[in-house]
Image (spheres, grey):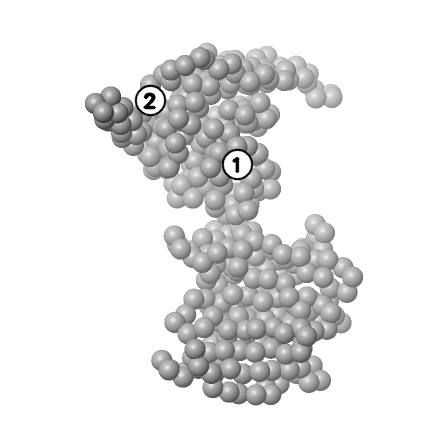
Amino acid sequence: MVRRITALLAALALCLGLCACRRYLPENSGKPQEAPPVTPAEPAAGETETEPLTLDALNVEFAVGARDVNELLTLQKRFPDALINALGAQRVDVGKVDVTFSPSGEATQAAMKSGAVQLAFLPAEDYFAYPFGTVIAAEKAAVPELTTGLILSADGGERLVSALRKALPDLKRVLSSYTSETALGTYVFDEEALTQLERLHETGDAQLCAANASVGGKTLTLRGVGHRLNDYLWGIRAIEVYDGETLVQTVSLSDASDDPDGGLDEYSSCPEPEQLFRAVDVNFDGYDDIEVFGWLTNNTIPYFYWLWNSDEKRYEYAFRLQGTTIDPADKTLSAEYRESAELFWRDVYEWRDGVLTQISHEQITE
């Protein structure tokens, strides 16, 4: 029993130590693990081999977050040699690599500004709350703001940036211990994610979600553009319509601002990014339209609709309904909403000569 209590106290002390800014972790016990193999760099066609870049040391900092202590111990044990070997293959000779851990992006920013840290692995939202340095790469994720980014201090230089990006495949296996809870044991850096992070930093918005729309035998890609509004909500202000890689239309949510039943502000508001909008055939003409989640209410959720105009080959704002149910079999739409605490209504609509027409209005009970 005494041994068990002693072990628990030791583990608690180690966890508390991680919460201090830029704390070193003790050496992990057990058999040392070899660094992963690296692929020697070769000059690209037409390039001449340059002299090695020599660095006395690189200090690397990782955000602790809710990560398991054993993962961090493994990372601290294996990452220095892995980074030295991977950069060496890119003709960057590093004498020493130290790994520290930080509880916040603000603390890491201060360390990078002071020169104590040159490289940092941080959640994107931390990086953009305290912008500094250069984003080397970003972890592949469905939503840019939920990625982990590798940040290099502002004075790192283009050659070190290039070498780090080329070295990333050789570091992936070691980094998997750091991102296993979000990346399922792999750490895949993604150029598209990096592009979206840079866009988020420059404009405040990025592509949060996407859907495919079928319009007359052609498939368009719809990409919702917005950002995380707060800890609980996401919002989009536009939907970009792509034909392949070509942007053919930008659907602005401000088109619905003057809706007589209550329009959208600049951004929609939704608790899950994948629910922000969807492609669905609303008027049953064989072309996918757009349904946008409006916002959370104490009534029922309002949805806003853009219909595909097959003649103009573009989306046009059409109408809003609350609590919508789409019935392709009957080719009707129904809307449910509350008038008072005890009074609920259901309206049913059908399309007549291209016009959405109400065909019933009845009281319902829950």
Rendering coords of residue 42 (x, y %): 67, 17
Instruction: State left or right for residue 130 relative to residue 361.
Output: left
First in sequence: mark 1 vs mark 2:
2
Using the image, tell me which numbered label, if any, was put on residue 184. Answer: 1
The residue where tag 2 is placed is 24
Label 2 element class:
loop
Q: Estimate the spatial distance between the alpha carbons at disc 1 and disc 2, rounded to whole Å.
A: 26 Å
Whether residue 111 is visible: no
Point out the frontmost of discs 1 and 2: 1
Rendering coords of residue 143 (x, y %): 52, 47
Image quadrant occupied by the C terminus: bottom left
Q: Amino acid at mark 2?
A: Tyr
| Of 351 and 317, the residue lying toward us | 351
Rendering coords of residue 20 (x, y %): 28, 30
Q: Which picture quadrant has residue 57?
A: top left
| Of 37 and 45, the residue lying toward us | 37
